């Protein structure tokens, strides 16, 4: 397989998701990191680059400099990964696209869905690939869940229930008022939403991915507990086909870590998946006992093997989900080079189109919650 070079914006040594991306990409010997702008703090930028053994002349102070200088090189990076807080996603993506690079950007894609649409327009004009790192889609049991639903294993979908609940913001909100707040709680960095943008965005995308259902309108109530942004939000959902669902996101649910759960109920049975036990999928056929399907087993209704990096029984996890996103995104770039149309779709990579729908969903939820739970349509 041809080597692909990538650069990273954000992801200094002390950051969360940048390192997870590097480990995910590191599963693949054909991917090599060659350039970066890891932090606004120049000392941290340099020390991260040193840890990663980057060439000094490919460590940049700003994304503008990185885009401009990389574009001039004969050995330029093939794509860039954007892992900064939400406030820079739009401007940095735009700069890298305009300089001619494929982009893989973190979610939520932008502050507004109009910004996300503009990025989609630029990517299309320039014939560049724009992926969005909805990384939970990379878990091996997720394509299986989607395929089982598509082939009718649970019949017609009647309703969906999903939650993504955490407890880590209880302390900053209620017990450490003088400490610096995490950037996720501050509109300047986070945008119009904290928890709906941060983790509700995963529910919106993942339920849409496994069921094929698009949210038409939402009715939401939220708590900020005196903070500027949402901490706890309950949503009623109506999809375009009128099926109803309920979603709950919270970051003050003490004892909950990354409890992201998806349950889909149909006329012939139900499926349930939980992010904390990602190798399993619970399948309950109507009038039968629940079965626990395990990743990597040959006899599954559809082989999740394609996405397994390890034999069944050796637990996989978060890093492998990212590794699978990198496998698909890099294959999409190689296919695109060969002239394959819609290479992201062909390789099942979450794209800028998904990013637009995600941001429009966040906007509708916040709009509804600010209007006392009035039903709000998701903008198209
Ligand atoms: N897909 C997922 O599962 C997942 C999980 C966590 C975070 N995220 C997303 O990833 C993004 C980053 O989140 P995080 O938790 O890693 O944040 P973080 O605060 O841990 O890391 C942010 C990094 O960006 C750098 N940075 C910020 N502004 C910069 C600038 N102007 N120039 C250069 N570097 C800059 C910081 O130095 C830091 O290295 C967010 O958009 C978040 O929503 C996604």
Image (cartoon, rainbow, N blue to C red):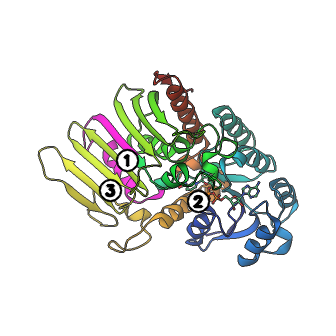
Looking at the picture, tell me which residue is in the foreground, 80 or 303.
80
- Sequence-earlier tag: 2 or 1: 1
Q: Quadrant of residue 22?
A: bottom right
Q: Residues within 10 Å of mark 1 (few under 14, many from 20)?
A: some
Locate ligand 1 by image quadrant.
bottom right
Mark 3: which secondary structure? loop
Task: Identify the residue at horizontal 42%, vertical 33% (top origin).
Answer: 235
Residue sitting at x 82%, y 59%: 66
- The magenta-colored residue range is 138-163
x and y percentages locating residue 113 in the rendered image: 63, 33
State which quarter of the image contains the C terminus: top right
| Element under disc 2 | helix
* Residue 147 magenta-highlighted: yes
Q: Which residue is mark 1?
A: 146
Cα separation, mark 2 vs mark 1, equals: 21 Å
Residue labelled with disc 3: 302
Residue 340 in view, yes or no: no
- Other residues around mark 3 within 10 Å, as few (<14) / some (14–19) / many (≥20): some
């Amino acid at each position: 397989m041809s080597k692909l070079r990538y650069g990273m914006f954000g992801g200094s040594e002390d950051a969360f998701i940048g390192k997870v991306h590097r480990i995910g990409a590191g599963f693949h010997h054909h991917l090599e990191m060659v350039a970066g702008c890891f932090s606004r703090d120049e000392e941290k930028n340099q020390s991260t680059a040193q840890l990663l053994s980057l060439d000094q002349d490919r460590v940049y102070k700003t994304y503008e400099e990185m885009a401009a200088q990389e574009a001039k090189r004969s050995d330029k990076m093939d794509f860039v990964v954007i892992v900064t807080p939400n406030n820079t996603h739009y401007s940095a993506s735009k700069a890298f696209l305009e300089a001619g690079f494929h982009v893989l950007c973190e979610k939520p894609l932008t502050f507004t869905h109009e910004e996300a649409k503009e990025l989609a327009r630029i990517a299309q004009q320039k014939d560049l690939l724009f992926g969005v790192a909805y990384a939970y889609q990379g878990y091996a049991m997720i394509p299986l869940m989607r395929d089982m639903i598509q082939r009718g294993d649970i019949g017609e979908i009647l309703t969906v229930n999903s939650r993504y609940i955490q407890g880590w913001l209880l302390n900053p909100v209620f017990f450490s008022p003088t400490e610096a707040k995490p950037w996720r709680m501050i509109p300047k960095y986070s945008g119009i939403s904290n928890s709906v943008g941060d983790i509700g965005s995963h529910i919106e995308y993942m339920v849409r991915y496994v069921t094929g259902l698009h949210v038409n309108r939402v009715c939401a109530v939220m708590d900020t507990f005196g903070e500027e942004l949402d901490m706890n939000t309950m949503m009623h959902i109506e999809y375009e086909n009128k099926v109803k669902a309920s979603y709950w996101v919270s970051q003050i649910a003490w004892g909950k870590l990354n409890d992201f759960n998806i349950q889909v109920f149909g006329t012939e049975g139900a499926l349930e998946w939980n992010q904390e036990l990602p190798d399993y999928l619970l399948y309950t056929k109507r009038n039968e006992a629940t079965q626990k399907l395990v990743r990597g087993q040959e006899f599954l209704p559809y082989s999740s093997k394609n996405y397994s990096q390890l034999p069944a029984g050796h637990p996989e996890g978060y890093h492998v989900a990212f590794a699978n996103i990198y496998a698909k995104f890099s294959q999409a770039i190689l296919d695109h080079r060969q002239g394959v149309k819609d290479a992201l779709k062909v390789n099942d990579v979450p794209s800028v189109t998904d990013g637009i729908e995600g941001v429009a969903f966040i906007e509708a939820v916040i709009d509804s919650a600010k209007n006392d739970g009035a039903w709000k349509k998701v903008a198209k």
